[in-house]
Image: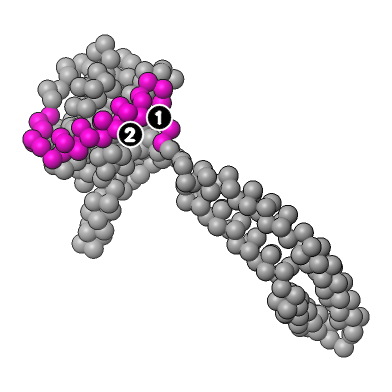
Amino acid sequence: MAVIVLGIALVFLVVCVSTWLLVFPEARERVVALLQRVARALGGRAARGGRKWAGRVDATGRTVRAAGTNTATALLRHRWVLAVAIALLALPPLLILAFRQHVVLEGFSAEDLSESRTMVAELLRGERLVPPPPPPPAVFTTAEVRRIKPEIVTADRKWDRINPDLQQRVLAIYRVMRAQYGIEMVLVEGYRSPERQAELKRDGRATNAGAWSSCHQYGLALDSAPMRAGKLQWDMGDDWTKQAYFLYGELAQQAGLVWGGNWRMRDYVHVEMAAECRRAKQARQRQGG
């Protein structure tokens, strides 16, 4: 979104400057004169004692001035056409910015997500949520898991090592997904030691971040996956799995978390408390860690 706004702002700036130069002859002549002075200075340094280059610069300046005057006259004559054209060019991006909406996957209606937002807020204001019983250990050690996600076999899944605020937000998301959509979410990794982080990076598994670079080291990030028919689901080519992860990401953002599915390097299982994590990293750096 920031790139779109910047692009629109640059286009608007170029249009404004161009119109200013074309409509106001005095401004145009000043700019041309400035360019001539710069060109003369450069020409004088490049060929001291010669006047051929300066003559060419003067001739070019006269040509530019004449062309600019003719163009300005033509544009002034058709200024209303120009104004309508600029308005038509600016209208579509302005309408997109004004009326843009979240894209919602088929199967999750806008009304459902609105209700979910309310449910998440109520849960966060209400009772203290308790982590659900973990699934059988065998869920994390199947042949499929060892082949697709071997790093989670030995992952830490202790809720008490996760920041309490993050716990409550994620547990609220879990409850909404289970109660409203029938999707069971499972914690696959919470706290991650710096040694484990360094090992994962060294082995090229799951991360490019080194020790103390991940929010997992501060208990401010965790990974979750949906479970169906007793198996963790990873295949984003499967419609049900894709919708489950996107719903998880939507609810995470409503709960004030950052979802890894929005990153360039997609990490659909990951959510974190980004601002708190930045402060934790800065505090560690100040302590000389």
In this picture, residue 94 sits left or right of residue 38: left
Q: Position of residue 165 (x, y in %)?
A: 16, 43
16 in relation to 266, above or below: below
In this picture, residue 268 sits left or right of residue 289: right
- Judging by the rendered image, the residue that carries numbered circle 2 is 250
Span colored in magenta: 102-131
Q: Position of residue 267 (x, y in %)?
A: 37, 34
Whether residue 254 is visible to the viewer of this picture, yes or no, is yes
59 in relation to 189, above or below: below
Asked if the residue at tag 1 contacts the one at tag 2, i.e. Cβ–Cβ closer than 8 Å, the answer is yes
**Name of the residue lying farthest toward the right:** 52
Q: Tell me the quarter of the image containing the C terminus.
A: bottom left
Q: Residue at x 8, y 35 (%)?
A: 127
Quarter residue 284 falls in: bottom left
Q: Earlier in the sequence, mark 2 or mark 1?
A: 1
Q: Secondary structure at mark 2?
A: helix
Between 231 and 32, the residue placed more toward the observer is: 32
Q: Residue at x 76, y 65 (%)?
A: 76
Quarter residue 75 falls in: bottom right
* Residue kind at label 1, given as amino acid type: Val
151 in relation to 35, above or below: above
Q: Position of residue 160 (x, y in %)?
A: 11, 37
* Residue kind at label 2, given as amino acid type: Glu
